[in-house]
Image (tube, coloured by chain):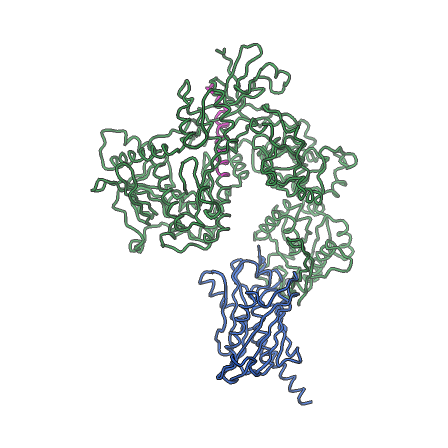
Amino acid sequence: MLQSKSFVKKTRHGKVLKVVREHYLRDDIACGTISCTVCDNSKACLSSSSGQIIVFDTNVALHQIGLLENAAVSNVVVLSLVLEEVKNKNIGVYNRLRTICSNPSRNFFVFSNENHRETYIKGLAGESPNDRNDRAIRVASKWYHAHLGPTSKIVLVTDDAENRRRALAEGIVALSVHEYVQTLGNAELLDLIIRTGSEEAQTTGDAEDLRPSKRKVIYPEHKLMSEITSGLHKGIYHQGKLRVNRYNGFEATVSSESIGEEILIQGRMDMNRAFDGDVVAVELLPEDQWQANSLGKIAEDADEDDNEEAVGLVPDVAEAVTDTVAAGRAGRPRGRVIGIIKRNWRQYCGSLDPMLNSGGAGGFVHALFSAADRRIPRIRIQTRQFANLVNKRIIVAVDAWDRTMRYPAGHYVSTIGDIGDRDTESEVILLENDVNNKPFSKQVLDCLPPLPWSLAAEELQNPNRRDLRHIRVFSVDPPGCRDIDDALHCTLRPDGNYEVGVHIADVTNFVLPDTPLDEEASKRGTSVYLVERRIDMLPKPLTEDICSLRADVERLTFSVIWEMTPEAEILSTQFTKAIIKSCAAMSYAEAQARMDDSRLSDPLTVDLRNMNRLAKIMRKRRIDRGALTLASPEVKFEIDSETHDPLDVGMYQIREANQMIEEFMLAANVSVAEKIFGHFSQFSMLRRHPVPTPKMLEPLLLTAAAVAVDLDISSSKALADSLDRAVGGDPYFNKLIRILATRCMTQALYFSSGDLPPPEFHHYGLASPIYTHFTSPIRRYADVVVHRLLAAALGLIKLPAGLRDKALLTTVADNLNYRHRNAQMASRASVELHTLIFFKNRPTDTEARIVRIKSNGLIVFVPKFGIEGPVYLTGKKDTKDESDWIVDEQSQTTVSRDGKYRYKVLDKLVIHIEVVEPQPNRPKLQLTLVEQPNA
Amino acid sequence: MDFISPEGLRLDGRRPLELRQLQAEIGVVEKADGSATFEMGNTKVIAVVYGPREVQSRSQQQHDQALVRCEYSMASFSTGDRRRRGKGDRRATELSLVIRQTMEAAILTNLLPRSQIDIFVQVLQADGGTRACCINAATLALADAGIPMRDIVASCAAGYLNSTPILDLNYLEDSGGGPDLTVALFPKLDKVSLLQMDSKIPLDVFEKVMNLASEGAKAVAQFIREKLMENTKQLVLAKGR
Ligand SMILES: [Zn+2]
């Protein structure tokens, strides 16, 4: 049967079109009930005998998706009409709903009511689309009842009272969500329900007077969408994504294309209920208000929120810098949010704020939720289980934020575990950084070769695979490394030159394009390293066995082999698939010890020394070219093997051996980048490191100027040279300046070569015109892509379809950048967590350096533990005392009024680190000054 | 975009291997020697045939076979946005050529030397698969004109979206970015007379899509045959009266 749908649609060019589409109605659509004898039962999952079958409307799906995700809700018919409407309104909810439907244990059946001959209805004259859809849902409910016979129990769940009334009149059982959840007999589930406007008025009148007329307006109103659109058109408003400062939830920026500059938004009022990531419309403030307080206080108590700066790891790149010095400069446009174009609400991990009177047991309590992500404002939720939840990490979803509500309203979704428990906190870290921690699915594991894997005879016959098993290949990695993806060799040739090989695990021999394994790896993008564990990109049999280039086993590799002169000039480069048999898997310390031990002169040691000599020449050449030797304080924990608690913490020691391996990996990456770009100029996956803008380097220059160091930032070479010259009174001074420089740099990024002109390929940090990632395919997907590109460039394989598509490759690169950043954030958060655990019973006095002066305190960096945080000079709440200190922004010094104390940036001082619990179960690190007379 | 729901239904409610509704009418233009409209869903094409008749320009006359000419055009009201489409644009020229060659292969041209056959094809409503629909309409119109043919020509398109081969794409699916493959064949001879596709696809996928399009064309051929039988029956009845 054929129906034609016609509707009117506006095109991009503003023309109005009438669109006619065919709509076929069918009689072969199954009802999905197991006991049904009429329909095709192959995909049936509903049971008509064991109680009610639930049908719900679109608003229930949109508002109560958390409830639907709870396993207690089962035996549900999802109408295709509802899915379609949800998809149009909120793609996120749609995806979640689809996930439930595809889970066989949940018994959710999708019924294509809109394509069923008996359940499709045409809109009546004068009937609104909404009314028509409500009617369609009732018709479908009725059809099920008729189809399954009079004993069946079909329940329509809707919060629309009018719809319920009509349903009852038509003989359908209809319940509100609240009533339905009560039939499930599980009080905990009631917390999951989101109170929407109409229902709220009835149920919560007792707790607090929330009637609209009695509520006080707090926030300015959001403009109507039509006003926003015309305002954007006229250039009065500016559209962009709101980015909240990771370290200060009261400050955000909107990068607007129309202005070409970032608009600063300060304070909750001006942010006007926008969340991080929301697409907002912004109005600029008058120019005389652009000058903000230039020197931020450490804690800005503009709201009741107690949003102080916390002690944490040292920021690693420009993006993470909390500095408001640059932000508050005059001339930076300031604005305020006047409307939200697209919300970016997701679910948030965090905990409830403790309350003094938590009310009687079982009663509804209004509680405030603080998200682990500091960019997110507090969220108000209602719960019956406050006492249960207060010491747990929980997940909360946001429902609404009206003008009258100081905090957004949300609801409880689920519990992760106890606060402070390491596993719970790690889970929070993974969830917050969108790291997929689930075990690999069966489909993915099915792609693995059978174990135990061994070299197949036909590989030896493969003319494209060179047999290098006779060559003395070895690997050098961090101690305990089990996923060894690189190995090397260095042989002296009879003509006095060297043959140097970098052998990388041949991961793409096992991870084939367009397999579930490949898709999963592509989604994960990278392995994630937490302090106590690793979340793999590829399943363990590959990472730790089949692909790992362990000693004394035959392994497949993709190799880069150079002929080099003793002066480390590359004469020729070869790329080949190969078979190796590593003779030694050493740790950095072992390799270093061999090189240093003058008594040893075995071939392996000689190879290492030769290699090290070449590496030193290459490194010097690179630095002469302008590569930056930056420094980031990487912390290393010694972990108790049983309790997994940190036993000791210290800076990661960099040896010559590390630098040697790094040098050859860089060289291999550059060689491969040149090769693939030569073949595929439009779709090579490369990595670039943008030149930092002068603005980004401003904090560095400010500090340098204060300590009378002259930095030249005109090029990376100039900066590298001036960093070399920056030697202060003590040996650590230079390292400190380098650490400060590192954090001004941008992130290096993956990109597709077709998207940018070649000059933009430049890698600033390495001073290389072209660069890519080839050497770690076990733990980075970018390297997998590059392996395929290289194999195709050599004519070994055909380029997979996915890599021939420019747009697709760009999407892959974007995802890798996102995953990469998240993995770094997760690692940092994990180190922070373990730092906290470490200091719990170990209050410590240690040396620190001042990195910034603020009006009421100092920001100090603790080299030994790699942490940074505020030291308050005055009582932090007591703002009147501020005048006790005189701050000179120019020279970055602060002097106490009585002249007794004087602090200058980069000064050395002794601080006390300890864990305090200002509120029960909310431990945090606190840094305090150990009193010492000032010189 | 999802062109096929997890329930296995396409945007318009069809399953991947289903044709749209076919409709045809023969003899719609009295004045012409042969004419027909052919509908595949919302795609509607009219084909009108004049001939065999004397060759208009002497120089083009072929002494051993008939001259077949074809003119393709698109009515300005055939798509949503009304715009003039000339007969001379590249797409129209290309389609005219494709239709002419396909029909020429079917017509027993050597039986009609020194004559000319004109085929006019116009798209009245476009919703994907116009190429196939034009060929089907032309077949019916030629049959209506009583022009001798080796076999009827039936055509159908198929594509590949969401990793599934799908038959008879409508406009929405056609714009989905996947390959669009049109096959025309002689069902009785089981020979392919037209195979067109303008994108790259892996060989194994191509084979699947090609087979599906052929199956579709065979189903269309069956429909055309029934239509012709029905038409002949009516003509016989009309004669008998
Ligand atoms: Zn049934």
- Left or right? Give the position of B103 relative to A864: right
Q: In this view of the protein, which residue sits in the foreground, A624 or A217?
A: A624
Residue at 50% from the left image edge and 82% from the top image edge: B62
| Badge count | 0
Relative image position of residue B199 (x, y in whole percent): 49, 61
Relative image position of residue A317 (x, y in whole percent): 49, 33
Residue at 60% from the left image edge and 47% from the top image edge: A92
Q: Quadrant of residue A632?
A: top left
Q: Quadrant of ligand 1?
A: bottom right
Name the chief secondary structure element in magenta. Answer: helix
Q: In this view of the protein, which residue sits in the foreground, A123 or B178?
A: B178
Q: Is residue B150 visible?
A: yes
Residue furthest bottom in the image: B240
Relative image position of residue A126 (x, y in whole percent): 78, 57
Colour displayed for chain B in the image of the structure: blue
- Left or right? Give the position of A893 relative to A410: left
Q: Magenta includes A553?
A: no
Q: Is residue A383 visible?
A: no
- The magenta segment: A821-848
- Which chain is drawn using green? A
On screen, residue B220 above or below A928: below
Residue furthest left in the image: A494
Q: In this view of the protein, which residue sits in the foreground, A455 or A751?
A: A751
Q: Quadrant of the N terminus of chain A?
A: bottom right
Relative image position of residue A43 (x, y in whole percent): 57, 59
Q: Quadrant of residue A47?
A: bottom right
- Left or right? Give the position of A431 relative to A495: right
Q: Magenta includes A827?
A: yes
On screen, residue B107 above or below A215: below
